[in-house]
């Protein structure tokens, strides 16, 4: 009976409790009607709450007395809603003012952006993923002010040059430091693929990163931002946080799987408009030359063809077959006596083929709870370029491709109340092949594009045999065999690359009470790389064949130990202090074997070559640094940050190997300091900042002492005794060498207006670099040919302006970004008695450092001009070339501007990016040759009308000498180097994308949390208005490769345009 009474009492209690509650349901959405997933719905005054489902719906039991719901969602204004009588309450949230943004700064330290006295650019995963481009650096083009990114060519996997705020060293490294998940990441381009040893065929090692695995990128541009990285950060720092670097901490407790599949098409972007009226020859007469100044295709006069005339058939002149020559008849008897139609062929246009890129990626993440989470990623990339596939007798595969596998793991957990452990592991395997493109590898003719684009219109490139069926040697139309057939180059030579890389981190964090925290991080970046360059025997430039192999091993061990102290100093003051040490060891090893004189055709093994040369090299570099940073905050609107680092390097002698470089910055949030500006509807945010930073630049190892080369030589004494000897390097060591010293003053303004509809970010900087390290030539009589000295100075001054606008906000939202970058450099000092220093290019044509001039001006042979600037002609009426070299151009752009847009409506978004680069010269031997040889539509004129070149004769009188147009073009563009210099101003449609995300209502009854599809294109249109119309030249290339050179095209590969589709699904 007592049990029955107890049960009855409990039942009545719970019934009463249930009757006292109400169940409220509804949806939470934005002003456009889109459901908000994971919005918080809380009963005011209680701890009762819930979050919305994937369709924005919620259900909550409101206890007795509950009358108000508090609804919040990140990025939206929190809203309180009276429940009323209805049990269904639908809620609409409006976008709120921007939250206090937290950004990643030096050494991975997270800080509120408002507390920073320097500028930081941040890009989310959305801005780098789902793009047709596999190169992370190229995806960043135009996305951040102060960052200048130029590709070396349009070939898949070609190198990419990155500059942040200009050049800071004359001959040293000017590339920024990449830091991936807190660890320095080697992105160097190996110098054996430089301009003088093979040109721009090398890839940059950030190619090993997978764009789909990136969670966030932060770009630190000024020295006040990068000082904690020491001298490694002097050129700026690009911080990459991968999804594994976050270790799934942001994931749901349920396991989340994301799959992304993209496929795109690559096409050559810039072929010339060829003329189809004239064939090869000179002066209006046919000849087997490499120029198009021959007879018109409509010319049926036998005298225009000489002994090669064989008649006219169906209105087409027939001439001697190109291979009906004594040197080819044993190989091709079938062409003897067979006439050849003299007409326009489309061999160049038919040569290029579209490539296909496929990228598949998978990521898995799970937040287990209690501080434990993990993630895993895998991706596979197959990227094929626009050059033709190899012939079946080779292997039928792509002549230019990237095949890449990326695998990553990340995990973190809390081992004890105050100890957290975090780790990542990433592996990348990259295979790449590209045609030989460099003029330096075996001579001009061994580059694929050295002869391709200038093929005479009367040559049937794609149907004429390209190699002998007897011995495989090169065959081409040119009598004497001076020209290498581009198809022979494609199928009988190549540049192959294989990289195996892993990079990993382990991090321990231990909290000591509430104010102290100790962090230790160990990072490793290690990769091995093998490069093979090969050419079969039988070529024009390398008739005996060559096989070069280079094996590289690069390691970075990085240790970081931090002690963090945080203290509130009363109601108005706060203090954050970090002190730590950083130990870094870089090791590099290279083994090279060069073999010549091939025995068996098409077998590339060193044992198949009879002559060999080998060398090996190792270097080790150790850096020990200690640093400290302190931030004092006053009333959350004034922040003073002091930083300093002292490094000891192994590459300098004691007394010069230690350097302290300080930094200071101040941030003043005016809108928080002045009461009348708080909650202002017009001026929402205003911050003034100023920063001063310093850094160093250390030389490469082994510059301070004389070194012994270990290559042995046999020396026979007069008595017949054989001695093994070594040789002393021809470089004289300088034990007084000091670090380069860099200083920068930066100021800026950040503002947001009209409820964040307008955002402004302005930076001004002045950077000086002194004691710059250069190589100095010595008189060989000293026993040495060069040494290293501190003897140069350089300044960079610039303006960076970012403008964010939201012209439309509501159901349709239009976000717009305008950014502007201008940098002015000047060489301020060189070694006494040295008037210029070569940076890149040839000895008589290239980039140079000259006092009083911008860095890297172009130096070569100019045209002769009179005192008024008029061009002077010679006695045959063509322009004179000066016998003295001088400055012929400036490759540095005047400024760069980008206009980025995104228009969204419900799940649909449309984005595009325009880029404008103002001025900056480029020397192009491609354009020179196309015009000088009469290939393009610019030369499709009445060639029989004499031409008088504008200018004056040597006596100063106006030129009145008549010339044949072919001679005028040939001498003008193959004469002085200045004739090949053009203004590279370009406007470009950099990116276009159209994306659609399926609404949650469609996915509610499926296992998918998100499905999105994106159509995207890159470099779909451009216009370089200062080039001749028929050239269609795209100046966004650099034959001098990755490094300090700029503004040179030595017949390199054209650029590429890409378009494709990607599908993203999460479940």
Image (cartoon, grey):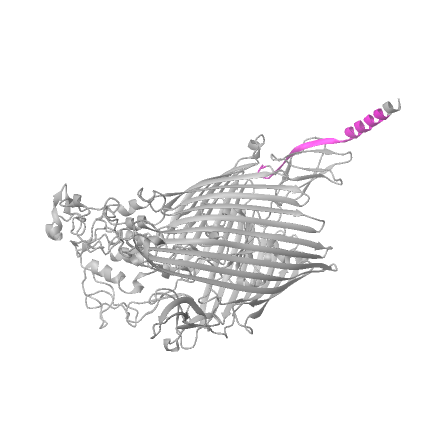
Q: How many numbered tags mark residues here?
A: 0
Instruction: Check the picture and name the quadrant holding the N terminus.
Output: top right
Rendered image quadrant of residue 878: bottom left
* Above or below, 651 relative to 1029: below
Residue 1035 point in image, percent of width and height: 37, 55
Rendered image quadrant of residue 563: bottom right
Side of 580 where 918 appears, left or right:
left
**27 falls in the magenta region:** yes
Regarding residue 714, the answer to whether it shows in the image is: yes
**19 falls in the magenta region:** yes
Regarding residue 682, the answer to whether it shows in the image is: no
> Which residue occupies 42% across, 45% down?
383
Magenta part of the protein: which range? 6-34
Front-most of residues 68 and 989: 989
In the picture as drawn, the residue positioned furthest to the top comes out as 1
Residue 21 point in image, percent of width and height: 76, 31
Residue 641 point in image, percent of width and height: 63, 63
Side of 533 where 1003 appears, left or right:
right
Residue 930 point in image, percent of width and height: 27, 55
Instruction: Check the picture and name the quadrant holding the C terminus.
Output: top right
């Amino acid at each position: 009976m007592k049990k029955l009474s107890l049960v009855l009492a409990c039942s009545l209690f719970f019934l009463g409790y249930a009757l006292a509650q109400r169940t409220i349901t509804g949806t939470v959405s934005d002003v456009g009607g889109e459901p908000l997933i994971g919005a918080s719905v809380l009963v005011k005054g209680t701890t009762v709450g819930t979050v919305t489902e994937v369709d924005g719906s919620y259900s909550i039991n409101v206890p007795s007395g509950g009358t108000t719901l508090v609804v919040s969602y990140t990025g939206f204004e929190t809203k309180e809603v009276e429940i009323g009588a209805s049990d269904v309450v639908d809620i609409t949230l409006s976008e709120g003012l921007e939250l206090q943004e937290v950004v990643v700064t030096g050494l991975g330290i997270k800080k509120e952006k408002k507390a920073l006295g320097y500028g930081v650019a941040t890009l989310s995963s959305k801005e780098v993923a789902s793009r047709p481009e596999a190169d992370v650096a190229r995806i960043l083009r135009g996305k951040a002010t102060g960052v200048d990114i130029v590709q070396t060519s349009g070939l898949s996997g070609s190198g990419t040059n990155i500059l942040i705020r200009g050049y800071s060293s004359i001959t040293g490294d000017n590339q920024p430091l990449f830091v991936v998940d807190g660890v320095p990441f080697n992105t160097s381009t190996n110098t054996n693929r430089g301009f003088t040893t093979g040109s721009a065929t090398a890839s940059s090692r950030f190619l090993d990163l997978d764009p789909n695995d990136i969670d966030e990128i932060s770009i630190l541009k000024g020295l006040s931002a990068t000082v904690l990285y020491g001298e490694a950060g002097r050129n700026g720092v690009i911080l990459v946080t991968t999804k594994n670097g976050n270790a799934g901490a942001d994931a749901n407790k349920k396991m989340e799987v994301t799959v992304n599949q993209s496929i795109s098409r690559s096409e050559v972007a810039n072929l010339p408009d060829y003329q189809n009226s004239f064939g090869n020859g000179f002066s209006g007469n046919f000849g087997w030359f490499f120029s198009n100044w021959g007879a018109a295709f409509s010319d049926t006069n036998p005298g225009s063809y000489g002994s090669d005339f064989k008649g006219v058939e169906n209105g087409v002149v027939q001439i001697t077959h190109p291979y009906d020559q004594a040197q080819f008849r044993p190989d091709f008897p079938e062409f003897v006596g067979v006439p050849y139609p003299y007409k326009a062929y489309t061999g160049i246009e038919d040569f290029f083929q579209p490539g296909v890129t496929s990228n598949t990626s998978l990521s898995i993440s799970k937040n287990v709870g209690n501080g434990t989470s993990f993630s895993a990623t895998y991706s596979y990339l197959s990227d094929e370029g626009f050059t033709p596939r190899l012939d079946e007798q080779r292997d039928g595969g792509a002549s230019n491709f990237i095949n890449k596998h990326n695998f990553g793991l990340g995990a973190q957990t809390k081992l004890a109340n105050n100890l957290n452990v975090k780790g990542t592991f990433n592996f990348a395997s990259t295979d790449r092949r590209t045609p030989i493109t460099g003029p330096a590898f075996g001579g001009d003719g061994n580059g694929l594009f050295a002869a391709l684009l200038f093929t005479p219109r009367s040559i049937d490139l794609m149907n004429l045999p390209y190699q002998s069926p007897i011995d495989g040697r090169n065959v081409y139309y040119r009598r004497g065999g001076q020209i290498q057939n581009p198809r022979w180059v494609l199928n009988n030579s190549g540049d192959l690359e294989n990289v195996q890389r892993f990079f990993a981190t382990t991090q321990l964090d231990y909290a000591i009470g509430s104010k102290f925290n100790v962090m230790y991080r160990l990072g490793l970046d290690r990769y091995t790389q093998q490069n093979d360059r090969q050419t079969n025997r039988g070529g024009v430039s390398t008739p005996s064949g060559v096989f070069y192999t280079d094996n590289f091993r690069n390691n970075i061990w990085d240790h970081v130990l931090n002690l963090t102290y945080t203290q509130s100093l009363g109601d108005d003051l706060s203090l954050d202090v970090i002190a730590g040490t950083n130990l870094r060891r870089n090791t590099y090893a290279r083994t090279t074997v060069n073999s010549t004189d091939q025995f068996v055709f098409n077998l590339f093994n060193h044992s198949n070559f009879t002559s060999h040369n080998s060398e090996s090299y190792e270097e080790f570099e150790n850096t020990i640094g200690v640093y400290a940073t302190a931030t004092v905050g006053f009333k959350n609107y004034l922040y003073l940050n002091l930083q300093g680092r002292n490094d000891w390097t192994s590459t300098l002698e004691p007394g010069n190997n230690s350097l302290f470089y300080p930094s200071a910055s101040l941030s003043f949030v005016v809108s928080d300091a002045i009461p009348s500006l708080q909650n202002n509807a017009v001026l929402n945010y205003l911050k003034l900042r100023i920063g001063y930073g310093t850094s160093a630049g250390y030389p490469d190892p082994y510059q301070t002492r004389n070194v012994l080369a270990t290559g042995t030589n046999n020396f026979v004494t007069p008595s017949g005794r054989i001695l093994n000897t070594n040789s002393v390097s021809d470089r004289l060591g300088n034990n007084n060498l000091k670090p380069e010293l860099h200083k920068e003053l930066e100021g800026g303004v950040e503002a947001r207006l009209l409820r964040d509809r307008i955002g402004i970010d302005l930076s001004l900087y002045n950077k000086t670099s002194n004691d710059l390290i250069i190589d100095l030539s010595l008189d060989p009589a000293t026993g040495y040919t060069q040494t290293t000295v501190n003897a140069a100075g350089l300044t960079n001054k610039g303006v960076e302006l970012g403008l964010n606008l939201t012209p439309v906000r509501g159901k349709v939202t239009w976000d717009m970004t305008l950014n502007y970058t201008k940098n002015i450099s000047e060489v301020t000092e060189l070694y006494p008695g040295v008037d210029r220093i070569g940076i890149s290019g040839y000895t008589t044509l290239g980039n140079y450092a000259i006092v009083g001039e911008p860095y890297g001006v172009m130096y070569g042979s100019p045209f002769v001009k009179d005192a008024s600037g008029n061009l002077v002609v010679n006695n045959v009426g063509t322009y004179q070339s000066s016998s003295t070299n001088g400055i012929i151009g400036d490759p540095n752009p005047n400024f760069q501007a980008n206009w980025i847009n995104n228009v969204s409506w419900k799940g649909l978004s449309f984005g595009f990016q325009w880029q404008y680069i103002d001025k900056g010269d480029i020397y192009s031997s491609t354009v020179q040759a196309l015009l000088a040889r009469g290939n393009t539509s610019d030369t499709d004129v009445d060639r029989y009308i004499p031409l008088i070149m504008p200018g004056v004769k040597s006596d100063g009188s106006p030129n009145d000498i008549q010339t044949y147009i072919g001679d005028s073009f040939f001498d003008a563009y193959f004469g002085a180097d200045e004739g090949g210099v053009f203004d590279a101003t370009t406007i470009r449609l950099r990116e276009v994308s159209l994306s659609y995300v399926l609404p949650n209502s469609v996915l509610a009854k499926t296992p998918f949390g998100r499905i999105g599809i994106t159509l995207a294109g890159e470099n779909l249109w451009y216009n370089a208005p200062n080039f001749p119309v028929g050239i269609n030249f795209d100046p966004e290339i650099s034959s001098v490769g990755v490094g300090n050179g700029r503004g040179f095209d030595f017949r390199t590969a054209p650029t590429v345009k890409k378009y494709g589709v990607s599908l993203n699904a999460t479940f």
